[in-house]
């Protein structure tokens, strides 16, 4: 699935890697009230999802945490929600992860991620490197739900 130039094709969408400093990424995250304080720090990769005509439909990111990863910054632009695109973006992003476990933190989208194969895990079972990410250690509220990818998306 991974093509040259950091491009991933899945169904009708393509993922292109973008820098954390990308203005469209920041705008989409701000509009969805998702964290932007740390998006320009190292160890993160962000992707813009595009229709075949080049229209941007959403974003997602992965952050390295030791041997594991944090899936983060998942957003579908409002006009394109509820059409299965969020699921496609997450599935395409997860294809970037070849080893290790994948975790995420969410305050409102746990039911969405449950449909993709993530399950809630207690903080006591989350690796220290994941808990040490800025998202989990300082940006997200302590009440945030932490989830782990238990089974591959179907
Ligand atoms: C959460 C979000 C990414 C979902 O994107 P989407 O394109 O609307 O979702 P999809 O259409 O791919 O939905 C996939 C599945 O999840 C379900 N789902 C989507 N959002 C849901 C929600 N808020 N609650 C419960 N289920 C939800 C859909 O019904 C669908 O289920 P199905 O496969 O059984 O039909 C989108 O609503 C969004 O950008 N929200 C704002 C940002 C955010 O909260 N991001 C997550 C934090 S990292």
Image: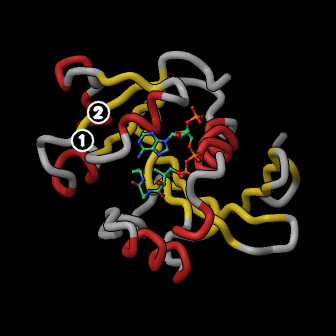
Is residue 67 in sight in this rendering? no
Out of 58 and 21, give the one closest to the viewer: 58
Q: State left or right for residue 87 relative to residue 40.
A: right
Label 1: how many Cα within 10 Å (few below 14, some 14–19, many 20+) = few
39 in relation to 130, above or below: below
Q: Could you say whether the residue bearing mark 2 is in a helix, strand or loop?
A: strand
> Where is the N terminus found, in terms of image quarters?
top right
The spot of residue 83 in percent (x, y) is: 65, 51
Q: Residue at x 12, y 43 (%)?
A: 142
Residue beneath label 1, please? 132
Q: Could you say whether the residue bearing mark 1 is in a helix, strand or loop?
A: loop
Out of 106 and 78, give the one closest to the viewer: 78
Q: Residue at x 45, y 76 (%)?
A: 26
The spot of residue 97 in percent (x, y) is: 62, 34
Q: State left or right for residue 21 relative to residue 18.
A: left
Q: Residue furthest left?
A: 142
Q: Residue at x 31, y 24 (%)?
A: 120
Q: Residue at x 30, y 47 (%)?
A: 108
The alpha-carbon separation of the residues under discs 1 and 2 comes to 13 Å
Q: Earlier in the sequence, mark 1 or mark 2?
A: 1
Q: Residue furthest bottom?
A: 23
The spot of residue 105 in percent (x, y) is: 32, 41
> Where is the C terminus found, in terms of image quarters?
top right
Out of 84 and 145, give the one closest to the viewer: 84
Residue beneath label 2, please? 146
The spot of residue 6 in percent (x, y) is: 77, 56
Colour scheme in use: secondary structure
- Decide if ligand 1 comes within 8 Å of the CB at mark 1: no
Q: Quadrant of residue 145?
A: top left
């Amino acid at each position: 699935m991974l093509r040259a130039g950091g491009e991933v094709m899945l169904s009708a969408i393509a993922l292109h890697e973008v820098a954390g400093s990308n203005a469209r990424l920041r705008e989409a995250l701000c509009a969805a009230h998702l964290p932007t304080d740390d998006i320009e720090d190292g160890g993160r990769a962000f992707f813009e999802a595009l229709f075949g005509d080049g229209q941007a439909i959403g974003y997602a990111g992965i952050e390295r945490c030791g041997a594991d990863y944090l899936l983060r910054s998942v957003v579908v632009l409002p006009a394109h929600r509820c059409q299965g695109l969020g699921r496609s973006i997450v599935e395409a992003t997860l294809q970037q992860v070849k080893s290790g476990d994948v975790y995420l933190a969410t305050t409102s989208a746990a039911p969405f991620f449950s449909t993709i194969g993530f399950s809630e895990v207690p903080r006591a079972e989350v690796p220290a490197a994941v808990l040490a990410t800025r998202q989990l250690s300082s940006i997200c509220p302590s009440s945030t739900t932490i989830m782990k990818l238990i089974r591959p998306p179907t």
